[in-house]
Image: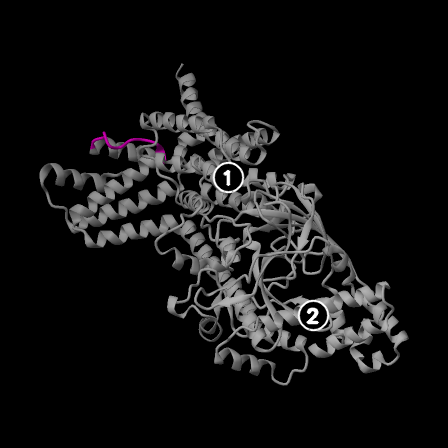
Amino acid sequence: MDTAKKYAEKLSGFAMPYLLCAVMLSAALNIYTEEVFDIYTAAAAALAAALFALLEFFRKKKFGGLFYFGTLILVGAVPNIVLRGGLFIGFIQWFFSGGQAVALRTEFITVFIIMFSFFFVSSVFYFTRVVYRSAAVLLVSLIPFALAVKSAAVLNWKYSAILAALNLFMFIYYSRQNSLKGAKAAGGSSFMVYADFAAAAALLAMIIPKPSETPFYEQFEKAVNSFQFGGNGVTTVLNGDYTEYSGNADDLIMGESRLLYYVRTNDPVYYKTQVFDEYDPEMRAWRSSGEITGDKSWQEGAELLSFEKLSSALEAAEEKSPGLYEKYPAARAYDGIAETAAFSVIYTREFSAIYVLAPLRITDASVSNLGARYSCRSENGEVFTNLSKLPQNRDYTVRYYSEDIFGRLIEAGACDIGFEEYGQLLHDAYQAVDYGAEDNDVLREFYYEYSLANEYKEENRSEVSAEIQDLADELTEGLDYDYQKAEALEQFFQNGGFVYNLAYQAPEALDTPEYFIFESKMGTCSDFATAYTLLARAAGLAARYTEGFTATGGQNPQPGTYYIYSENAHAYPEVYIPGIGWKVYEPTVAGGRNGGAGENAETDYIAFLLTAVIAIAVFAIFILLVIFYPKITEGFFRASLLFCGSEKAVRKLYIRHMERLGAKLEIDPLPMTLEEASAASSDKTGISLDPIAEPLGEHCYGGKNITREERKAAYECYKKQYKKLIKRKNKNKTKER
């Protein structure tokens, strides 16, 4: 009967903590699979049961903490083992999007189950089986709900009810138990599980959305800016409208991370949304010059803007009017050039926008699947439809010529020509070829694009300060061609010590392009694009400030699939280069298609190295503390005796020994008299406790002072007892095993 009662109590001590872990795992998996019970839930429950048994086995071992540490190392290595071949980025996107951004993969769910099973089980096991802490168990129970909040999922109310009930039942059960009152965790095990719990608390803090206003949050953001996955967590309204003033890119980047689009493409590019023409120094933003209008029949002209077709047209002009190549040597650079057709299938998510994502050299937008009758393109390249907003969770296709050809043309010398000279080349060639032929249409379209760029340059000559004008003159001095000037300006930012920092805000009175360029050298993509555009216009280039998105934020394991999050919003300049037309330039450091360049890359390496060194140092100190924790605490205790009188020192020796004896051998020494405690200690250790117990009894009951000799003898007795207890195994645990 006693045996049955013993096993019933033992089962009760396991059942509720295990059920709590199983329910938490089911709730967490429900966010990603939307299933209450399936094969994944069953696997997680089985793994949790095995981990409970393993941790109970570790608890009975002398070096249980080290065994636990070894298991922790193995679990920590799981992501590196399973998530190979670029899977890690996909897992991060899958995890933080609640499984919405990336399709479920076996590798993802395997890592999730192993990591969360180990965390839930080890934390709940420690805070129930070793030392009961109801608040800690409750905090761990909140993790599934934090995951749900982050991924905008709604957990079934039954999970809340079951988890609340289990926490309440455990509180009642453990409050009535005395078995753990005198128990102490082994030093190593205690440190390990507290570290595990601290990591969970950090995870909880990371996955819960931050409030829109937090005291000292800006200082915190500056400290961790280099280590964020993207976005600062501030809730904002995602704006898919055309706006009068720029800044939507910054709003999207600084808002809570949201998946806006995912893209299937053979050529990821910058996707334009809107161009802003005039810089307003009072608003410190760019302004659209007017209502955006466009041409419904734009595709035919866009299709003609092919350098392969231009090559054929120039060749025909040379045949009709020999001497064209001699007069314009840059025209020979197009010989033998071949265009590459590209496409992007864009899937809209829960994001309403007016605009179609438009690559720079777009030739067509197939929007019939959206329910639109037609698309229009503005003179600045913005594309929209007859719909007030594009529908969500639908797809459309844009086709365009690849921008990779630009590098080949520049290298071949197509851009070694002045602005006016390039216009004259197109005009002369147009006059030479037969009217009505395709070659004539091609040259007419290139000349029309050139004329619009020339008109844009003349109408948008931004007034700049003397400092910006002087800098533009200095950076472009001695350069003959526009592409050389545009590249020189780009290199100024890439190699000029500038820093990309979302958290930085210039003093209100000094929030100007001049302060950014010459003083702070720190800001967002909008600051970089603004400064570049103003410098480019000061240098005589046709430049425009553009906002849109990049598709370089992350590529999942499926080749050709990209994701556009809110933090992929981007501001960048476009410059019209004679010989190739409009071209994207990237002044923003550590951003854009090439991921940054120049001296700022060194900062990232230094930050990474410093972080690694600190992490290794902290880890090493932690391991040393775990290994030597018992000796450290014992050393502090013995040192404290030096500052005590003899009576207090002997009393502390007795209490310390009996606490250790009670924890080690599962006896309760509190109700015992000194004689009973001495007898119990002698029986368990084989060493008499009289040198401690006798002088303490005479002092407590007879008022006799303890001499220095008695204190010394008590201390020697304590050291012998300490050594014996360290070596002795727990007989009760041996019987259980």
| Residue 181 coordinates in the image, percent (x, y) | 31, 32
Q: Which residue is farthest front?
A: 435
Q: Amino acid at mark 2?
A: Ser
Q: Residue at 67% of width from left, 75% of height from top?
A: 483
Residue 343 at x, y percent in the picture: 73, 53
Mark 1 or mark 2: name the one nearer the start of the chain: 1
Between circles 1 and 2, the one closer to the viewer is 2
Residue farthest toward the left in the current orientation of the protein:
703
**Residue 552 or residue 240, whichever sits in front:** 240
- Residue 183: image quadrant is top left
* First to last magenta residue range: 664-673
Q: Position of residue 116 (x, y in %)?
A: 52, 39
Query: In the image shown, does 496 or 146 lie closer to the viewer?
Result: 496
Res. 308 in view = no
The number of callouts visible is 2
What residue lies at 32% left-to-right and 39% top-to-bottom?
A: 660
Q: CA distance from mark 1 to mark 2?
A: 49 Å
Residue situated furthest bottom in the rendering: 478
Camera-side residue of 146 and 641: 146
Residue at image point 83% right, 66% down = 440
Q: In the rendered image, which residue does mark 1 sit on?
A: 152
Q: Main secondary structure of the magenta part?
A: loop
Question: Which SS class for mark 2?
Answer: helix
Q: Is residue 153 above or below residue 558?
A: above
Classify residue 126 as left or right of residue 83: left
The local crowd at label 2, few if under 14, some if 14 to 19, many if 20 or more residues have their Cα within 10 Å, is few
On the rendered structure, is 639 left or right of 309? Answer: left
Q: List the residue tagged with mark 2.
A: 451
Badge 1 amino acid = Ala
Measured from the top left, where is residue 492 in percent x and y? 57, 75
Is residue 442 in view?
yes
Q: Is residue 247 above or below residue 113?
A: below
